[in-house]
Image (tube, coloured by chain):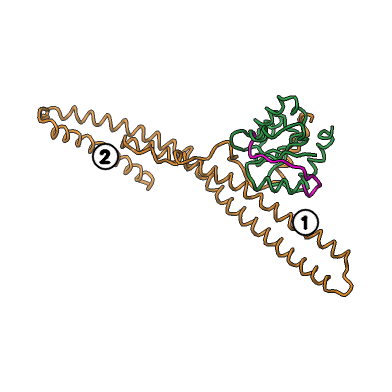
Amino acid sequence: MKFLVVDDSATMRRIVINSLQRIGFNDTVEAGDGQEALAKFDSSVKFIITDWNMPNMTGTEFTKVLRSRDDGRHVPVLMVTARSVKEDILTAMEAGVNNYIVKPFTPQVLKEKIDALLPAAAA
Amino acid sequence: MTSSRAHEVLYESEAALRLVDQELSGLHDVRDVSPAVPTISLADLPNILEQANAQILNVLARLRESRAALQTTALERLQTTHEKIREVTSATEDAAINIMDACDRATQMVDELDAIDADAAPDREKASGIRATLRDELFLMMGALQFQDITSQQLAHASSVLVDMEERLLEVARLFDHNVDFTHTLRVSGAPDEKTYDPNATTRNAEGRQALADELFTSVKAPAA
């Protein structure tokens, strides 16, 4: 299953990708912001993990655009972000994010969220 | 008179003196440049002083407004920023300690693996268990590096506050001198992009904040994937 990992921090991208590899997902593609993610997204991507705060296009903007596309309407989007006030979480939800991880996260939390969304990704 | 009130009076007096000095210099300059300008008589002095007084009052009013704005918003932001910078120091130290602890444990495990290897009949099962734990430790070290992303957002926020402060101070400076140079400001040299950081980013209480997110995603119907 191919994962698209979107974060402007190269450190965070490596941490997320290493975490994915550790739980058995080795097929990953990465992007530094929403615009690059849109350019790299295609039907082979089955799961998206995105940050919120990024230059050019934020994670919520990216998710909104993705949800307006036929091929991006149902792909699971897991947001991994430092933003954690109630209003932000609701905004992410409205944008079309399927679940939410607050930074700093543990590998266990990442695994739980991915596991919960896997059935949708596999559909 | 309290020291802060004394400071205020000194500040306002200095501003007033600068303006009076500016007015007097102006009069002096005009007489130097254009001899055709008639000499100011003593009878004109009340009008000139009244004009100067009005200008001084106007500038003082603007200074008071600026001071109030600085006190209410800027000082609060500076205090928050100060706290954030202290948190950066603390988060960096915590991460360094966590990584060093994990390094110590990992080194100890490598020693144990060496000991098993040196044994005439190596306990492969035990070695396998140690290697798994060692991988966990290495993974924990990597996870500890998440502080870098959060602290960089905190520093970007601190930088944006400095840019804002500089602009407020330049506005005040411009009250005294309209020729204040705005070409080499922090904003011109590259202020942080607001999209790239969260002003509330923190390394603290991750579990509590995750619990809030989970609660909201459970109570409010999340979009189906």
Taking B86 as reference, is B134 above or below it?
below
Instruction: Name the residue beneath numbered marker 2.
Output: B18
Q: Is residue B64 above or below residue B148?
A: above
Residue B3 in the image: above or below residue B218: below
Please give left or right for residue A11 compared with residue A123 in the image.
Answer: left
Image spot of residue A37 (x, y percent): 67, 35
In the rendered structure, the answer to whether residue B23 lies left or right of residue B117 reads: left
**Residue for point 26% across, 39% down:** B18
Chain letter, colour green:
A
Q: How many marks?
A: 2
Give the residue type at disc 2.
Arg
Neighbours of disc 2 within 10 Å: few (<14), some (14-19), many (20+): some
Residue B175: give x, y in percent of width and height.
Answer: 33, 35
Task: Tell whether A17 sits left or right of B162.
Answer: right
Image: magenta residue range: A21-34
Above or below residue B109? Residue A73 is above
Amino acid type, mark 1: Asp
Q: CA distance from mark 1 to mark 2?
A: 68 Å
User: Drawn colour of chain B?
Assistant: orange
Q: Could you tell me which residue is drawn at 35 percent across and 45 percent down? A: B7
Q: Nearer the viewer, residue B129 or B154?
A: B129
At x 84% / y 65%, what residue is drawn? B127
Chain at tag 2:
B
Residue B211 point in image, percent of width and height: 74, 41
Q: Quadrant of the C terminus of chain B?
A: top right
**Quarter of the figure with residue B217:** top right
Q: Which numbered circle lies on residue B136?
A: 1
